[in-house]
Amino acid sequence: MSRKWERIYFGLAIMMMILIFISSSMTYHQQTVTPELGRLNLNWLHRWLDPVKINYAGNIYSVETEGLVGMIEFLLRKLAHFGSNFLLGLFAYWGFTSKVPNKWFRAVLIWLSCTGYAAFDEFHQLLTGDRTPMIQDVMLDATGALCGVIIATIVMIILEAKANKKKLLTAK
C-alpha cells in the first residue's frame, strides 16, 4: 500500500473518531430520528420486525415494547455503533500499515485502541445530558472494530499474496 493511501486511511480514521465524538456530544433529543421515521409509511416492515425481540442491556426491545418507529430507531442506533467502529477499525488498520508493519501486532493494537476509544466515548456520554453510557455499547463498538480489523487483515493478506505471485511470475 502506498504512503498516499496510508495517509488517506489515517485521515479517514481520524474523521471517524471526530464523528463518533460529535455524535456522543449530542443529546438523545438532538439525535432522534423518530419524528422523521413517523412521517414515512413503514408498515411493510411489520412483517419482518414483529417477531424480533432483542434483549439488550437487560431490556427487551421489540415492536410491541417500542412501537415500530421506536424499534427501527433502536436498530439504526445499534447499527451506527457497529458500523462507525467497523470503519474506524478498518481505516486505522490500513492507516498504520508502515508505522506498525507486523500485521498481527497491528491488528491487536488497533482493536485494543478502538475498544479503548469506545470506552472513552461511553464515558463522554456520561458527561452529556440525556445520554446513558452502557457497557453493552462498548462491547458492540469493540465487535464492530474487530470485524473491521479482521476484514482489513484479510484484504492485506490477499493483496500481499497477489503481489508475491506477480513478483514470482516476473522473476521467471
Image (cartoon, rainbow, N blue to C red):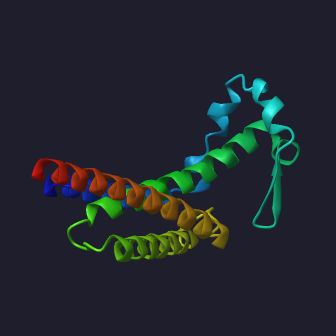
Q: Is residue 34 left or right of residue 167?
A: right
The reply, left or right, for residue 77 in relation to residue 44 is left
Which quarter of the figure has residue 129? bottom right
Residue 32 image-quadrant placement: top right
Q: Residue at x 15, y 58 (%)?
A: 3
Is residue 45 positioned above or below 49 on the image?
A: above
Residue at the spot x=42%, y=62% of the render? 89
In this orientation, which residue lies closer to the viewer: 55 or 105? 105
Image position of 44 (left or right of 86): right
Is 149 above or below relative to 107?
Answer: above
Is residue 26 depicted above or below 105 in this figure? above
> In the image, residue 85 lies at what x, y percent?
48, 59
Measuring from the top left, give residue 75's x and y in whole percent: 67, 47
Q: Nearer the viewer, residue 119 or 40?
A: 119
Number of numbered callouts drawn:
0
In the picture shown, does residue 45 fall above or below 63?
above
Residue at image x 54%, y 67%? 142
Pinpoint residue 73: horizontal percent, then vertical percent.
67, 44
Quadrant showing the N terminus: bottom left
Q: Residue furthest front?
A: 172
Residue at the left extreme? 171
Which of these two is toward me, 32 or 164?
164
Where in the figure is residue 144, as x and y percent of width and height? 53, 59
Q: Name the residue rendered at 11%, 53% in the picture.
A: 171
Residue 127 located left or right of residue 104: right
